Amino acid sequence: MCKGLMRVRAMARRRVFGIASGASGRSTVTSQAGTPSSHHPNTASSRPSPHHPTTPSSHHPILVVIPLLVIALCPSSARAQFTPRPIADPATGERYHIEAAAGFWFPTADISIASQSLGIIGSTIDFKKDLGLTDQRFPEVHLELRPATRHKFRLQYIPIKYDQTGVLTRNVVFNGQTYSIGRAITSTLDWKAYRIGYEYDFISRDRGFGGFILDFKYTDVTANLATVASPIVTEFTQAEAPIPAIGGIFRIYVVPNISITGEVTGFTLPEKAFKDTNGHYLDVNVYGTLNFTNYVGVQVGYRALDVGYLIKTDTGSFTLQGVFFGVVARY
């Protein structure tokens, strides 16, 4: 469009200059005697010159005004065609390459195990009802590396351990040994939960993102039962396995420095995939983050962890869910 206006602009200049030169020519015509032509109306110099016709249209004022307006508007039209690219303005807390978080988790526990040995079927032992387990708090640490805006590598570690002493209210069989009613039992459950994952955010905006997660969860659980008085009977069972998982994550900023994040990852091993082996793993997190600056913030949220397994004749069921608090630092 502006090219066409430029052509009109050039034509307007020629027309304006042509009118100006025509007016100048008429004002300077003189007679051969050196006196102005107005003193000799009957001379040939007073007749219209064939080189400067004096038609009415060549003197109309609008023909001068319109081209001048075209000349004035053309630069404005050219500027209007240029639209600058928007500058990214990430929310507070989203400018980082390394993020570290630490806090405490306060879950309620529902844990039961059964272990068979020497062909003796084990009892399903409830750690709260049978062994006196009480809810505890556990530390947790997180590390995230973000080499690019949409790519994140994640590491999480939560050491879970319960120690308790209780008096049996029924006979139980554990790992081929019988523990009689009325006996005092010390028990330990040591569960190390590692999580290594990769996150890709296929939606990435200044005020939030959404993506998928590929996780590799390594679970190592050891349960130990021992009598307090003689005869001393001590038995333990251990289950450890790498568990792949897949899931999704989203984050939205309700205001520029407060976000809400939700993520779910899980995996189910079909019963027919391996003989006498199956299991499931589900990890749900919902939390809010208050960022004081781009580098420091606090978090509060709710986590639910559900793990179950069957390995030959040993079974385990672990469900922990509760609130957590933490601080986060970024670089």
Image: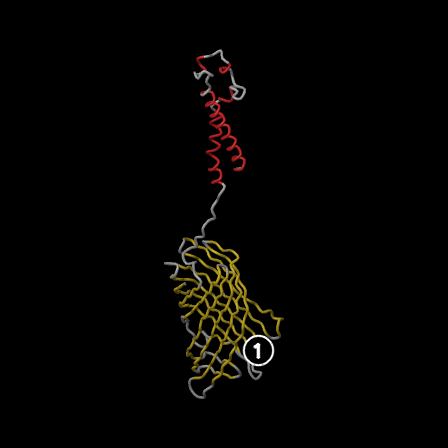
User: Mark 1 Cα within 10 Å, few/some/many (few <14, many 20+)?
Assistant: some
Residue reaching furthest front? 33
Q: Residue at x 46, y 12 (%)?
A: 40
In the rendered image, residue 102, in percent from the top left (x then y), is placed at 40, 67
In the rendered image, residue 324, in percent from the top left (x then y), is placed at 41, 65
Residue 27 sits in quarter: top left
The residue carrying mark 1 is: 313
326 lies above or below 169: above
Q: Secondary structure at mark 1?
A: loop
129 lies above or below 63: below
26 lies above or below 329: above
Residue type marked 1:
Thr
Q: Residue at x 50, y 73 (%)?
A: 219
Q: Nearer the viewer, residue 310 or 191?
A: 191
Q: Nearer the viewer, residue 148 or 15?
A: 15
Split into 4 quadrants, where in the image is the N terminus? top right
In the rendered image, residue 155, in percent from the top left (x then y), is placed at 47, 68
Residue reaching furthest left? 292
Residue reaching furthest bottom? 231
Split into 4 quadrants, where in the image is the C terminus? bottom left
In the rendered image, residue 301, in percent from the top left (x then y), is placed at 42, 62
Q: Nearer the viewer, residue 288 or 213?
A: 213
